[in-house]
Image: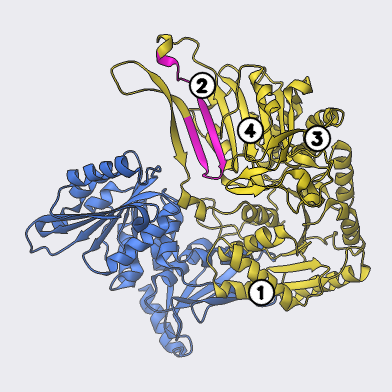
């Protein structure tokens, strides 16, 4: 019956009309954390400000602090004031503040969860959230089982018909295949897979979604998007910050698990996948799963991978400590802060094209980009000297910062001689454009409230990513210490060697 | 940076623009459209340019302002180029036209249009009777008018309905988006019952209220009453009648609304009147014809216009007479 109901006010031609989430509320566990203050709360305000949250939307914080609702409201207020993207408007804030609640307690505290139930039931009555609630687990994975079990025990995980309950989890999704499966099992025991939303905030970024638009909406690129023309692909996510203060999370995890397993492999899937039959979430996911299934690490790992650990030095005009000097890390920690790997995609389209993935902390600058480097022209009708400065053509997606696309090709240098040199053609979203394009978390939270799953990796994708990464991680545990590199450089020398052995080199992003 | 070019020609303006780009690489970012603003030579033009600059942060564009000055003066073109901090993410070219030139704006605009990019024309104040027939309107793929800022908003809206051509749009429609979104979302929820009647009340000269009523009439195929509110700005309330009870949105103060629905607690929603810059940014987001706007315009005649404020209903006999007149 409900399926045949057609809202007479909606019309597919009416493109202005935003889709507003139905009545619902969001419960954040670990609400005192950094992520919650810097990203989640501001994103919720920005959504409210854009009129995309339902009237009566409610936000419940759950943490150990001894706060009243007002104290929590104040914390949200400050987070919004400081970090929100859109201008502060009192009337928007007032509506949001009315729906702020706080529940105090530890995760193993039955009473606290019973209080949460009362709070939620009360919100259904007072704010009209209609029993639709999402639970955002912004907490260490070790605490997942406890919280999920509590949600099951109190019946919060089980919606009655016409209601929904969803759970949102953040990376890391395990630390290897076995633990990822275990984690999925724990969560899936309580929440069915379609109610689980795994956040990979990279997928919420405009530029990442633009990869699919650029590839599949244009005639220009897809014909050369294969091993006949592409020489190799480089995916880089570099950060200039160190790991001070993050030892608890990072020590023993390392760069490959932290970044490659999720963000970089998702980027790889988007750039390498076949055209989905439609943009239906299922169709897109099917293609991603296919490409991840075909992706294999290339050995021997001693030559095709690199891992490093930053040492102290000068960076950006400041003296910075090495990893081993950062507080909280063991003096003999072998956690890698730089990881580079080579992958192959065993499909007709990509056979023989290496995909190089690298990530690291305390590198030259903060940048994420994805470069498709093309083969040289098979024949150059110029003499050698005129093409000395000609490199390989490249198409670069700049994911952050300075979002945009760069095309690199050869062009004649003005003058009486024929001389060809590399030039860049730039498409940029523009500095100002970024101000107005929504934050990744805004998009993802809205999609989750709408129950729209396309931008969230599935269980399968997570497990496949671990299958790709596990052999490399295993080899690394048997190969001693990571190679040291100086803070502010582009990683250890082994990273350069892994490309130069086939006559290639890393782009300097 | 603001550069004045008094008594100039468009080719000089063009070469100055190229020169600026070569010299400083100022704003070489790709522009996605040309926005032509047609206005007069008055002070309010600055507010309009401000709004366009704001919108340009979302849609990098070249803004050409055609400011028509005194017609009785000698023919003369004064230009002003603004780039960098003075122009948001856009480059603004202000063309002041005097004398016989004042009516020949299109000829000055053509040389400055970006190659192969869509053109949007915007009349922030008085619009021509038929935007599509206007020489500048003919250049544009999208024509934005603002009935609310005209001398007689209701008449202006009727004129729009008569002269509608695909690509026309009006800010009175843009101001409705939040209302329409709320109403649609309210109907998304169970019980999925048919709406039997609707009422929109607001200021008597609010073209947005008229359009909202017309849109509801067209979509819901029910009689929609348009009432004059005793107080409040713009749209003041909307009621959708259903068997289980009405869905009601009230906005007495022009900023915060309350939404009530049977079986749900009353909820407050931020429903502030949208500034022009937000509206123009929304308009630039879509460059294809807005068929739903057309649908609304065409349904303006279907609105049942009650007489007088809600409280002072006429006696039944008088109402019967009104009805007879309406049908005749």
Which of A360 and B243 lies nearest the eye of the viewer? A360
Query: Quick one: label 2 or label 3, which is nearer the N terminus?
Result: 2
Above/below status of B313 relative to B78: below
Q: Nearer the viewer, mark 4 or mark 3?
A: 4
**What's the CA distance linking mark 4 and mark 3?**
18 Å
**What's the CA distance linking mark 1 and mark 2?**
55 Å
Above/below status of B297 relative to A200: below
Residue of label 1 = A97
Q: Nearer the viewer, mark 1 or mark 4?
A: 4
**What's the CA distance linking mark 2 and mark 3?**
32 Å
Which of B316 and A465 lies nearest the eye of the viewer? A465
Residue of label 2 = A392
Which label sits on residue A466? 3
Q: Nearer the viewer, mark 1 or mark 3?
A: 3
Query: Quick one: label 1 or label 3, which is nearer the N terminus?
Result: 1
Q: Secondary structure at mark 1?
A: helix
Q: Is residue A371 left or right of residue A181?
A: left
Q: Is residue A99 visible?
A: no
Range covered by the magenta-colored residues: A386-407
Residue B33 x/y as whole percent: 37, 46
Q: Is residue B321 visible?
A: yes
Q: Are marks 4 and 2 on the same chain?
A: yes
**What's the CA distance linking mark 1 and mark 3?**
41 Å
Q: Is residue A322 left or right of residue A434?
A: right
**What's the CA distance linking mark 1 and mark 4?**
42 Å
For mark 3, name the chain. Answer: A
Q: Secondary structure at mark 2?
A: loop
């Amino acid at each position: 019956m409900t399926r045949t109901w057609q809202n007479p006010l909606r019309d597919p031609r009416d493109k202005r009309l935003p889709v507003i989430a139905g009545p619902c509320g969001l419960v954040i566990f670990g609400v005192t954390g950094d992520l919650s203050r810097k990203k989640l709360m501001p994103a919720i305000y920005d959504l409210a400000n854009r009129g995309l949250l339902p009237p009566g939307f409610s936000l419940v914080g759950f943490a150990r602090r001894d706060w009243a609702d007002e104290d929590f409201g104040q914390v949200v207020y400050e987070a919004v004031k400081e970090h929100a993207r859109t201008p502060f408007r009192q009337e928007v804030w007032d509506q949001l503040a009315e729906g702020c609640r706080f529940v105090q307690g530890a995760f193993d505290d039955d009473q606290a969860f019973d209080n949460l139930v009362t709070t939620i039931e009360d919100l259904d009555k007072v704010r009209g959230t209609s029993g639709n609630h999402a639970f955002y687990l912004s907490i260490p994975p070790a605490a997942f089982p406890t919280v999920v079990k509590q949600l099951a025990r109190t019946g919060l995980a089980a919606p009655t018909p016409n209601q929904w309950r969803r759970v949102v989890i953040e990376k890391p999704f395990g630390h290897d295949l076995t633990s990822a499966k275990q984690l999925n099992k724990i969560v899936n025991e309580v929440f069915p897979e379609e109610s689980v939303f795994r956040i990979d905030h990279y997928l919420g970024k405009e530029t990442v979604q633009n990869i699919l638009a650029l590839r599949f909406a244009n005639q220009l690129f897809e014909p050369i998007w294969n091993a006949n023309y592409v020489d190799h692909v480089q995916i880089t996510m570099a950060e200039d910050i160190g790991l001070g203060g993050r030892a608890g999370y990072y020590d023993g995890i390392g760069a490959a698990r932290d970044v490659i397993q999720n963000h970089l492999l998702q980027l790889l899937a988007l750039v390498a996948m076949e055209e989905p039959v439609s943009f239906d979430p299922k169709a897109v996911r099917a293609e991603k799963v296919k490409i991840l299934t075909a992706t294999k690490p290339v050995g021997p790992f001693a030559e095709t991978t690199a891992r490093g650990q930053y040492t102290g030095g000068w960076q950006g005009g400041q003296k910075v400590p090495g990893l081993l000097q950062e507080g909280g890390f063991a003096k003999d920690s072998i956690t890698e802060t730089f990881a580079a790997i080579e992958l192959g995609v065993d499909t007709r389209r990509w056979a023989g094209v290496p995909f190089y993935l690298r990530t690291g902390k305390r590198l030259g600058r903060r940048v994420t980009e994805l470069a498709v480097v093309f083969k040289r022209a098979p024949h150059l009708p110029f003499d050698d000297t005129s093409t000395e400065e000609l490199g390989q053509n490249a198409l670069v997606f700049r994911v952050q910062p300075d979002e945009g696309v760069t095309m690199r090709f050869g062009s004649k240098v003005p003058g009486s001689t024929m001389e060809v040199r590399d030039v860049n053609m730039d498409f940029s979203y523009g500095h100002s454009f970024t101000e107005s394009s929504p934050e990744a978390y805004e998009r993802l939270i809205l999609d989750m409230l709408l129950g729209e799953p396309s931008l969230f990796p599935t269980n399968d994708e997570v497990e496949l990513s671990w299958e790709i990464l596990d052999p490399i991680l295993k080899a690394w545990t048997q190969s001693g210490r990571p190679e040291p590199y100086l803070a502010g450089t582009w990683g250890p020398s082994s990273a350069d060697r892994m490309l130069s052995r086939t006559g290639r080199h890393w782009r300097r992003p | 940076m603001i550069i004045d070019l008094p008594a100039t020609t468009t080719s000089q303006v063009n070469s100055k623009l190229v020169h600026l780009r070569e010299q400083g690489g100022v704003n070489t970012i790709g522009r996605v459209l040309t926005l032509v603003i047609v206005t007069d030579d008055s002070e309010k033009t600055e507010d309009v340019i401000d709004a366009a600059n704001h919108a340009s942060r979302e849609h990098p564009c070249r803004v050409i302002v055609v400011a028509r000055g005194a017609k009785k003066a000698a023919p003369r073109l004064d230009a002003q180029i603004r780039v960098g901090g003075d122009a948001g993410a856009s480059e603004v070219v202000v063309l002041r036209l005097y004398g016989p030139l004042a009516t020949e704006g299109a000829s000055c605009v053509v040389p400055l249009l970006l190659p192969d990019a869509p053109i949007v024309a915007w009349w922030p104040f008085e619009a021509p009777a038929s935007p599509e027939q206007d020489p500048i309107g003919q250049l544009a793929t999208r024509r934005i008018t603002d009935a609310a800022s005209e001398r007689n908003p209701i008449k202006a809206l009727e004129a729009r309905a008569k002269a509608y051509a695909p690509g026309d749009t009006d800010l009175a429609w843009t101001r409705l988006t939040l209302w329409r979104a709320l109403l649609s979302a309210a109907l998304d929820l169970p019980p999925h019952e048919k709406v039997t009647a609707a009422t929109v009340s607001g200021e008597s000269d609010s073209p947005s209220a008229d359009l909202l009523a017309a849109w509801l009439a067209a979509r819901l195929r029910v009689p929609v009453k348009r009432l004059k509110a005793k107080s409040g700005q713009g749209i003041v309330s909307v009621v959708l009648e259903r068997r289980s009870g009405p869905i009601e949105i009230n906005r007495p103060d022009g900023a915060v609304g309350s939404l009530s629905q049977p079986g749900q607690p009353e909820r407050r929603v931020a429903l502030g009147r949208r500034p022009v810059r937000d509206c123009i940014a929304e308009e630039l987001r879509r460059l294809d014809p807005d068929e739903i706007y057309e649908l609304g315009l065409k349904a303006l005649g279907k609105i049942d216009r009650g007489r007088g404020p809600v409280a002072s209903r006429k006696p039944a006999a008088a109402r019967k007479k009104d009805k007879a007149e309406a049908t005749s």
